[in-house]
Each structure stands twice: as structure tokens, then as C-alpha cells.
Image (cartoon, rainbow, N blue to C red):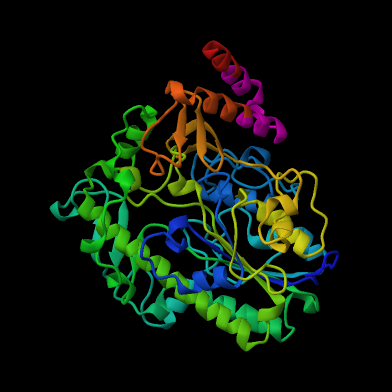
């Protein structure tokens, strides 16, 4: 694109997966078959250093909607839990979708919501097209009705190869449901159903039958329920990957030596202490199969764009709310552990005529930067209240932060406030090489990601890293001040005194 040209307002197709690891679609990742995600990377831009602001579903999704870090929107833990600190977004808080709808975009939504106990996408400018599940939202019964029509009602299918946390499930012990094979056809999975609803939306948009007969561009968001546990997949995906051929990741050698005590406590809390590698290999195989299942559904969606002549005028964005452990560091799910397994996320953007095909952006970006990005794509002013930077300049300049901005940050900032096990304060700053984690009630963490990509050795007390530790603390304080973090009255004093005591 020539300098000074303003791209026309594109349609936007945003596909958000639930708990998808960064490495599944990374070029140097495990052997997971993701040809459609790879295609988005080859036809657009892949972001190498994208992170979530928090590895909790509701909190991350609320950040995505509001362009704010969790402490800015207040939804610090999951809205469906009894201990939710704030079960709904404040009604006065601005969301990118409302602004897009006000500007003439026809906004539609399928799938998981999980941003409010009593709110739905329709409260934020979207027309909701169904696909939720009861555990997270209970917005509608569309998928249950779909399964009944196909003769396989939800909950009435006998699963196979079931795996649970805790002790070996084959001795009859109880635990959390981790993975299984389902005998249903692919067409009866929620992933297929959500793709069908998304294709229906594309067809309606192509025919000009959107909300209120708007003739402007469309924004469609498709939120898949996977590959979040339980990793339940049908054939051929259930046996696509052989557990016997899956080697333990380097981080499986975790000893918890020198780590915050909550790390080992969480292993027991989640019941993962009874799982050996053969169990995790089975779970990983199902997880990878789940990713491949979703990838194939994404292919169907992209084909629909092409069939209706919309591919060239539609920006396609794929990201995840956060990652998943699946046995890395011997952990299950996510929690008060700020490893790249759960904080680093996939992000690919294909925007014909803007994003250079096959480009890679190594600038550090956040998931909720997409809120500002979507607004700039739609020529809508980004609110000053957003803690988000638009990625459009990166897309227009081949991912080069120097060409996109004179002051692009060299780090990302993240936080954690606790899950159903109780409140727990964490803050993190991550540069290309180093990571610093502030743990309020316990020892802090420093990792050299170049020397120790598995994040096994906590270097917080290593004398050779004193300067690194000091610099990272300064970066963390800057982020807290910049985002008006409510803990800035306490944490900076603690870290500054700690640094002075080392001098």
C-alpha cells in the first residue's frame, strides 16, 4: 500500500479459540496438523510475540472487548463461578463492538461468550446466532436442538478412552474429566456446528440480509469451545496422533525447586499429581486432535468466504484467549503460573492488500490490542481509556515496530488475580529474552528465555542476573504506572527497596 493511502473499511472475520497453545501452529512447534492456520500465516502476518493479559477465560475476553487490562475492567476471575469478583462488565464501559456497530458495521457472533453472568453478546452490539453451552453461558439451546435432530442428544453418548485427573482412572477413582473419544460423527461436534453457524452468517452478509438491513461491512466473531478440556474428539481426530510417539516436553522435568510454593500446591489442587507421562501423552494426543478438528472447520469457513466472493475484502484474524499446560511443568489447565505455556498465544492476521503475505512480526503485542486494531480497521477512533495499541501500523509496515511507531514498547505486561482457589496477586513483564514475575505472597521469578526456554530455573537470586532483575523491575513499575494499576502504591515500593538493598 502506498504511503498515505487509507485502506477501505474491510469486513472482519475474527476466530477466537479457547485455550489454544501458541506452539501448535508455530513453525518450530510440535507436529500438529494446522494447514489452515498455516495458510493464514503464509497469506498474511504471524505474530511471534503475542501474549494474553491474563490466563483466565472471562478476564481475557473482557480485556479483548474493552481494550483494557483486567484491573481496568474489573472482571478479575471467571464470571460463572460463585466467587466471581465482578460477574458482569460495567454497563458504562465502552467496548469495541458497540463502537463498530454504531459506525455502521453489521456485527454478529457465534459460540462461547463467557464475559458476563447476566449479559450476552447482544448487550454489546452483536446479533447472537447461537452455539453457547450451559456451563459457561446458557444463552440458548441451539446446539442441543441440533444434536437432538441428528438423533444423538447431548449427554446421551457413551464416551470411550476416558481420562481423569487424580489417580489412574482405571482403578475407579474420581477426578476432573480430561479427555476422551466420542463415537459421534464430526458433523455432530460443537466445532462443526459453530462453523455451520458462521458459514450461515457469511451467507447472510453476502446476501445483504444482516442486522437492520445494514449495507456497511460486517464483523463476525466465531468463538470455538476448544481445544479447552475436556479434550473430547471423534475419529479420525481421536487417533490422528499416537501417544506412544509423543515425547515429554523439556518442562516436564519440573522439580519446583526455587519456585513459588503455589506451583506445587496447584499441582495437587488440580489433581494432576496422580498423572504420569503415559496419561499426559494420551491427553496431548487428544488435545492436538482437537486443534486439528478446529483447523479443518476454519478451512470450511474460509472456503465460504471465497465461494461468496468476500475473501479479498475481508480481514481474517485468528487468536486464542490463552494457552494450556497439558502436562507441561506437569500441570493441568492454567492457574497462578505465568509460563509461556498459558500466556503466549497464537495470532495470525490475513488482510489482503495490507498485511504482507508470509510476514512475521516480532514486536511484542497483547491480545487486547485487537480491540484497538478492529476499531482502526473500521476507521473508528480508539478511546483514550483503552490500554491497547492498534496493530494496523505493524500490518502496514511488514511487522517492523520502528516503521510503525517511534515508541513501540519492548515488552508485554500481564497479571493474575486468582481463580476459584482464591485471590493471588501476580504481575509479569516479558521482553524478548527475559521474564520477571512478581508474586505478592512468595518468591519472585526471573527466567532467561534464551538459555532456558522451558523456564525451569528461577534466577531471581542469581548474582549474575542482578542487572537484569533491576531492569525488569523498572519495566514492571513503568507498566503499572502507565496502566494505572491499583497495586502501584505497594508493588513499586517493595521492588525499589529490594533493588536498593542489592546495591
> What residue do we see at 68% from left, 55% from top?
400
Is residue 401 rendered magenta in the image?
no
Location of residue 476 with respect to 297 vertically, above or below: above
Location of residue 286 with respect to 367 vertically, above or below: below
Quadrant placement of the N terminus:
bottom right
Q: Main secondary structure of the magenta part?
A: helix
In this view of the protein, which residue sits in the foreground, 250 or 141? 250
In this view of the protein, which residue sits in the foreground, 132 or 331? 331
Q: How far from the left and from the top, in percent, is residue 232?
A: 34, 65
> What residue do we see at 67% from left, 42% from top?
409
Quadrant placement of the C terminus:
top right
Q: Which residues are magenta?
A: 475-495
Q: How far from the left and from the top, in percent, is residue 341?
A: 43, 48
In this view of the protein, which residue sits in the foreground, 292 or 103? 292
Location of residue 317 with respect to 55 vertically, above or below: below
> What residue do we see at 68% from left, 67% from top?
355
Quarter of the image where one finds residue 127: bottom right
Is residue 331 at least partly visible in the picture? no
The answer to whether residue 437 is left or right of residue 234 is: right
Q: Residue furthest right?
A: 4
Q: Total number of numbered labels?
A: 0
Is residue 178 at least partly visible in the picture? yes
Q: How far from the left and from the top, in percent, is residue 282?
A: 25, 60
Quarter of the image where one finds residue 260: top left
The answer to whether residue 242 is left or right of residue 71 is: left
Amino acid at each position: 500500500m502506498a504511503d498515505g493511502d487509507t485502506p477501505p473499511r474491510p469486513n472482519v472475520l475474527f476466530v477466537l479459540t479457547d485455550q489454544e497453545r501458541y506452539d501448535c501452529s508455530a513453525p518450530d512447534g510440535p507436529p500438529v496438523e494446522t494447514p489452515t492456520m498455516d495458510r493464514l500465516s503464509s497469506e498474511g502476518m504471524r505474530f511471534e510475540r503475542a501474549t494474553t493479559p491474563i490466563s483466565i477465560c472471562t478476564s481475557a475476553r473482557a480485556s479483548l472487548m474493552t481494550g483494557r487490562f483486567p484491573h481496568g475492567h474489573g472482571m478479575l476471575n471467571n464470571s460463572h463461578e460463585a466467587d466471581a469478583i465482578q460477574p458482569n462488565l460495567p454497563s458504562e464501559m465502552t467496548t469495541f463492538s458497540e463502537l463498530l456497530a454504531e459506525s455502521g458495521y453489521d456485527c454478529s457472533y457465534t459460540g462461547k461468550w463467557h464475559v458476563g453472568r447476566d449479559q450476552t453478546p447482544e448487550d454489546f452490539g452483536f446479533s447472537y446466532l447461537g452455539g453457547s453451552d450451559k456451563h459457561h453461558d446458557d444463552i440458548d439451546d441451539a446446539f442441543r436442538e441440533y444434536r437432538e435432530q441428528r438423533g444423538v442428544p447431548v449427554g446421551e453418548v457413551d464416551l470411550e478412552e476416558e481420562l481423569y485427573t487424580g489417580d489412574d482412572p482405571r482403578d475407579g477413582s474420581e477426578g476432573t474429566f480430561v479427555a476422551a473419544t466420542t463415537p459421534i460423527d464430526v458433523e455432530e461436534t460443537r466445532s462443526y456446528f459453530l462453523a455451520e453457524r458462521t458459514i450461515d452468517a457469511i451467507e447472510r452478509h453476502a446476501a445483504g440480509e444482516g442486522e437492520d438491513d445494514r449495507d456497511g461491512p460486517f464483523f463476525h466473531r466465531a468463538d470455538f469451545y476448544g481445544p479447552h478440556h475436556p479434550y473430547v474428539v471423534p475419529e479420525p481426530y481421536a487417533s490422528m496422533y499416537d501417544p506412544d510417539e509423543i515425547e515429554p516436553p523439556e518442562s516436564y522435568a519440573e522439580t519446583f525447586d526455587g519456585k513459588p510454593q503455589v506451583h506445587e500446591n496447584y499441582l495437587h489442587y488440580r489433581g494432576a499429581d496422580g498423572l504420569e507421562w503415559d496419561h499426559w501423552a494420551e491427553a496431548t494426543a487428544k488435545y492436538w486432535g482437537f486443534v486439528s478438528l478446529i483447523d479443518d472447520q476454519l478451512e470450511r469457513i474460509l472456503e465460504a468466504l471465497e465461494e461468496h466472493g468476500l475473501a479479498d475484502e475481508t480481514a481474517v484474524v485468528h487468536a486464542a484467549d490463552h494457552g494450556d499446560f497439558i502436562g507441561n511443568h506437569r500441570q493441568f489447565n492454567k492457574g497462578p503460573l505465568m509460563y509461556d505455556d498459558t500466556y503466549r498465544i497464537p495470532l495470525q492476521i490475513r488482510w489482503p492488500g495490507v498485511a504482507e503475505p508470509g510476514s512475521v512480526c516480532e514486536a511484542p503485542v497483547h491480545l487486547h490490542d485487537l480491540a484497538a486494531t478492529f476499531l482502526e480497521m473500521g476507521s473508528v477512533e480508539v478511546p483514550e481509556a483503552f490500554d491497547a495499541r492498534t496493530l494496523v501500523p505493524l500490518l502496514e509496515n511488514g511487522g517492523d515496530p520502528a516503521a510503525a511507531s517511534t515508541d513501540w514498547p519492548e515488552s508485554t505486561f500481564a497479571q493474575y488475580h486468582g481463580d476459584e482457589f482464591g485471590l493471588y496477586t501476580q504481575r509479569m513483564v516479558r521482553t524478548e529474552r527475559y521474564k520477571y514475575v512478581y508474586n505478592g505472597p512468595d518468591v519472585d521469578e526471573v527466567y532467561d528465555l534464551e538459555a532456558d526456554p522451558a523456564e525451569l530455573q528461577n534466577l531471581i537470586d542469581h548474582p549474575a542476573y542482578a542487572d537484569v532483575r533491576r531492569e525488569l523491575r523498572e519495566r514492571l513499575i513503568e507498566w503499572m504506572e502507565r496502566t494505572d494499576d491499583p497495586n502501584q502504591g505497594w508493588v513499586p515500593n517493595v521492588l525499589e527497596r529490594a533493588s536498593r538493598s542489592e546495591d
